Image (tube, grey):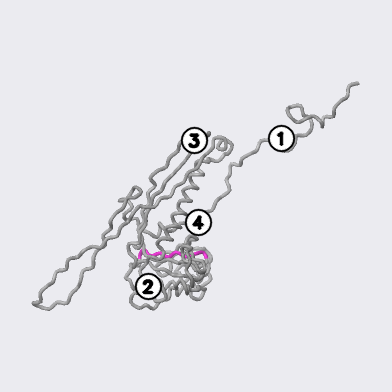
Amino acid sequence: MATITPAATFPVTGGMATSPAMSGTFIPTLWSGKMNAKFYARSTFAACSNTNWEGEVSQLGDKVIIQNAPSITINDYSAGSTLTYQKPTPSTVELALDQGKSYSFEVNDVIAHQARPDLMEMFSTDAGEQLKVSIDTSSWAATFDQGAAANKGATAGVTSSSFDLGTDAAPITLTTSNILSTILAMASVLDEQNVPEEGRWLVLTPRERMLLMQSSIAQAYYTGDSTSPVRNGKIGMIDRFELYVSNLLPTGAADEDWDGGADAGTALRHAVVAGHKSAITFANQLTKTETLRNPSDFGDLVRGLTVYGHKVVKPEALTLLVAAG
């Protein structure tokens, strides 16, 4: 009588196996049609800038010379006096489109076939968001402290020198008790420079927003709205400032400069920036987006280039608070 080999000893290599299928054998991997949501830091730089000269620059290295209106001198006059004629000469500011950022990625045909989401669209969307975050971070780092000397420091105020907006060595510790008065001080600094009220903005960190929500502004009558901002989460405007919240404002570590270089005597601090839309001009131009087949594999290659530039053209319309922490 022939010996019968038990079914459990058959190798699971084809359709011969009669035992229960082993986990992972002949069971296809399923790619979900839903992608896990991704969060991005909020960009604010473009919203706080003007784009008055964006249309005049379009390629990397382009620049435009901006002329500032000169001030006309006013003289006392008495009958019969001889008039002296001024020759106004505009000063100039140069806006250069001299900064660039790029991205490049591959969409493999096999992975794209297995994945139900549109990978090309998903990756392109992510690249666009990452570009905004990167540009925002570098742009704030280059401009946050470029306001007029009278608009920052322990003696801010072009006429009064009476507002303490903090220094690297002595940043302001903000609390629920002083945050509103500090914001009012920043507004007063701009008032002393005759900065227009309409078009002002203020960029806070999430910590400052929390302090505001715990301060007197929690009472609806401080904002003029019928509902407290603690109830609806919207702060809106404070003393003519349109408020923005960002995680991308510059920070300085203890005993380091804002850019990470050694600077003994400083303290842990971060920037809170306020100004008027006329203060900073920003130009951004996406010059190249290309899709091509991968010559060494099956798939598509996508690459993009953004060139941009920014300039503080009205330093008197930009103020800085150096906050502790």
Marks 3, 2: nearer the viewer: 3
Does dot 2 land on a helix, a strand or a loop? Answer: helix
The one nearer the camera, 205 or 311, is 311
- Magenta stretch: give its range: 198-206
For the residue marked with disc 2, what is the amino acid? Val
Marks 1, 3: nearer the viewer: 3
Instruction: Name the residue carrying label 1.
Output: 25
Q: Few, some or many C-alpha atoms within 10 Å of disc 2 (few <14, some 14-19, many ≥20)? A: many
Q: Residue at x 40, y 62 (%)?
A: 143
- Measured as percent of width and height from the top left, residue 193 is found at 33, 71
Instruction: Name the residue carrying label 2.
Output: 189
Q: Residue at x 41, y 70 (%)?
A: 239
Gap between marks 1 and 4 measured at Cα:
42 Å
Task: Examine the structure image and report whether residue 202 is included in the region drawn in magenta.
Answer: yes
Q: Few, some or many C-alpha atoms within 10 Å of disc 1 (few <14, some 14-19, many ≥20)? A: few
For the residue marked with disc 1, what is the amino acid? Thr
- Measured as percent of width and height from the top left, residue 199 is found at 36, 63
